[in-house]
Every structure is written in structure tokens, then in C-alpha cells.
Image (tube, rainbow, N blue to C red):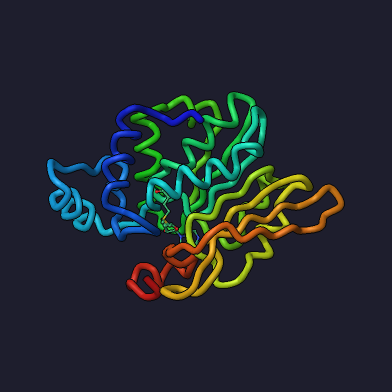
């Protein structure tokens, strides 16, 4: 499975030592955070006050979606944050595929664009990868239908808008459950006749898919 860069992979591996499950609260500099010790790394991540998914959850989600991120596929990453996972998805769909990442924090989207520009600018200039600001609970109908949808935050209920934007034969991976409570990572497959097949993958702890204002006030986290 291709990943964007050695530097990115090393960062993920460092993080995985610390984040055994779920998510850690950090902000926009998550892409480039590092430290000479675990405590220094944690301090640096905390100081950026953002959210990034645990690296092993990124890897797991990509494995789940692997067969749907084929050359030429269309994909959507809701809660794209640093842009790391979205960039991975863009690499997987190849030159003829398209991936949209959406996050409701404008500054985060701008940072994610800078992140990708510094690592692989042609993903953006070619139009293969688009990073936009918006409420991901509505999905991104302009790019639908999608072969693959990933949601990087926990939906309180199954997001019907996103299911509607899934192509017949498509797959969505999303954590479903209450903030701070019981959540499970779920896979939704839309069959060719439109039937939804739901598979529970594992228990997880994700930050909520929520209102922008609530997130900025630190509620729900
Ligand atoms: C755990 S982070 C995902 C990190 C991302 N996978 C990465 O590689 O950096 C969850 C993200 O969901 C975003 N988010 C939460 N609610 C949202 C909503 N309603 N619409 C769009 N993004 C949302 C947050 O701003 C945050 O960036």
C-alpha cells in the first residue's frame, strides 16, 4: 500500500508508539510534529491543539478501503484534518482517480493544502486531490457518487447523506457512536441494487463529527 513519503511514515511510526487506540488532541501541525523523546513529542502535539487520527487507524482504514481505492476511483475523506490520509487515498487512486478531502475548520484546510504542497504538489495541481472547507456531514455532492468514503470523526448516527453519495458497489468506513461513549468502526457496502450491508469492525474512540462552533469552543471533545 503506497504512502506519501518516508518522512510521513516515520512520523506515523513515532506517533503509533504513543497512541494505542483512538485519537489524540492536537492541531494543525500534526503532519510535521516530532520530538526527541515521547514526552517531548506529546508536548509538541498538545501545543498544536489539533486532532489527528491514530496512525494505526489510518492504516486500518486504508486496508478496509483498499479494494475501492483502485486506479481511477473517486473517493471522499470527511474530516480530512492534516490531509495526510487524504493524500494517501489520492496516491492509491492513481493519476486518473479523484479524491476530495473536506474539513469544517478553514485554517486546518489551509494547513493541509500547505502540507500536501510541500510533499507532493502535483497531487493538487493535477486535480487528483482537492481539499475544501465545509460541513462534511453533508458530504460533497459535487463529486459524488463515490467508490470510497472515509470519515475521520465519529458520527452520532449513521450519516445518511454520505450513504446517499456512495456509488452502488461503493464502501464507506465510519465510526458511529456517541462522543466520549461507545463507538464502533463500521463498514457500509452499497450493493449494486442499492442495499446497504453493514459490518461492525471494532470498538474505537474518535473525536465527534460535530458543529464547527462546538469544536472551536472545545465542546464535544
Ligand atoms: C481525528 S481528525 C481526522 C484527522 C485526519 N484523518 C488526518 O489525517 O489528519 C477529525 C477531523 O474531523 C473534523 N471534523 C469534525 N466535524 C466535522 C464536520 N462536521 N465536517 C467536517 N469536518 C469535521 C475535525 O476538524 C478534524 O480535523
Q: Position of residue 19 (x, y in %)?
A: 31, 54
The residue sitting at 61% across, 35% down in the picture is 98
Q: Position of residue 151 (x, y in %)?
A: 54, 55
The residue sitting at 37% across, 28% down in the picture is 5
The residue sitting at 49% across, 65% down in the picture is 209
Residue 184 left/right relative to 53: right
The residue sitting at 58% across, 26% down in the picture is 94
Looking at this view, is 11 or 200 the one in front? Answer: 200
Residue 133 left/right relative to 36: right
Looking at this view, is 113 or 190 the one in front? Answer: 190
Q: How many marks?
A: 0
Above or below: residue 171 compared with residue 155 = above
Q: Position of residue 142 (x, y in %)?
A: 67, 48
Residue 81 left/right relative to 102: left
Looking at this view, is 91 or 135 the one in front? Answer: 91
Above or below: residue 218 compared with residue 169 = below
Above or below: residue 48 compared with residue 86 = below
Q: Quadrant of the C terminus?
A: bottom left
Residue 134 left/right relative to 22: right
Q: Position of residue 179 (x, y in %)?
A: 45, 73
Q: Quadrant of ligand 1?
A: bottom left
Q: Quadrant of residue 147?
A: top right
In the picture as drawn, the residue positioned furthest to the right comes out as: 193
Amino acid at each position: 500500500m503506497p504512502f506519501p513519503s518516508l518522512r510521513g511514515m516515520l512520523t506515523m511510526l513515532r506517533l503509533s508508539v504513543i497512541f494505542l487506540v483512538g485519537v489524540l488532541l492536537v492541531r494543525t501541525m500534526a503532519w510535521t510534529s516530532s520530538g526527541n523523546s515521547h514526552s517531548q513529542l506529546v508536548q509538541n502535539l498538545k501545543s498544536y491543539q489539533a486532532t489527528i487520527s491514530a496512525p494505526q487507524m489510518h492504516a486500518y482504514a486504508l486496508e478496509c478501503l483498499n479494494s475501492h481505492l483502485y486506479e481511477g476511483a473517486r473517493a471522499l475523506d470527511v474530516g480530512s484534518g492534516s490531509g495526510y490520509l487524504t493524500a494517501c487515498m489520492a496516491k492509491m487512486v492513481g493519476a486518473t482517480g479523484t479524491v476530495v478531502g473536506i474539513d469544517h475548520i478553514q485554517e486546518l484546510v489551509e494547513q493541509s493544502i500547505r502540507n500536501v504542497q510541500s510533499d507532493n504538489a502535483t497531487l493538487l495541481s493535477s486535480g487528483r486531490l482537492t481539499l475544501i472547507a465545509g460541513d462534511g456531514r453533508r458530504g460533497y455532492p459535487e463529486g459524488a457518487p463515490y467508490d470510497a468514503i472515509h470519515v475521520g470523526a465519529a458520527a452520532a448516527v449513521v450519516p445518511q447523506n454520505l450513504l446517499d453519495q456512495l456509488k452502488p458497489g461503493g464502501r464507506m468506513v465510519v465510526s458511529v457512536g456517541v462522543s466520549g461513549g461507545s463507538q464502533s468502526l463500521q463498514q457500509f457496502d452499497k450493493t449494486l441494487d442499492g442495499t446497504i450491508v453493514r459490518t461492525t469492525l471494532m470498538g474505537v474512540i474518535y473525536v465527534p463529527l460535530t458543529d464547527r462552533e462546538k469544536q472551536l469552543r472545545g465542546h464535544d471533545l
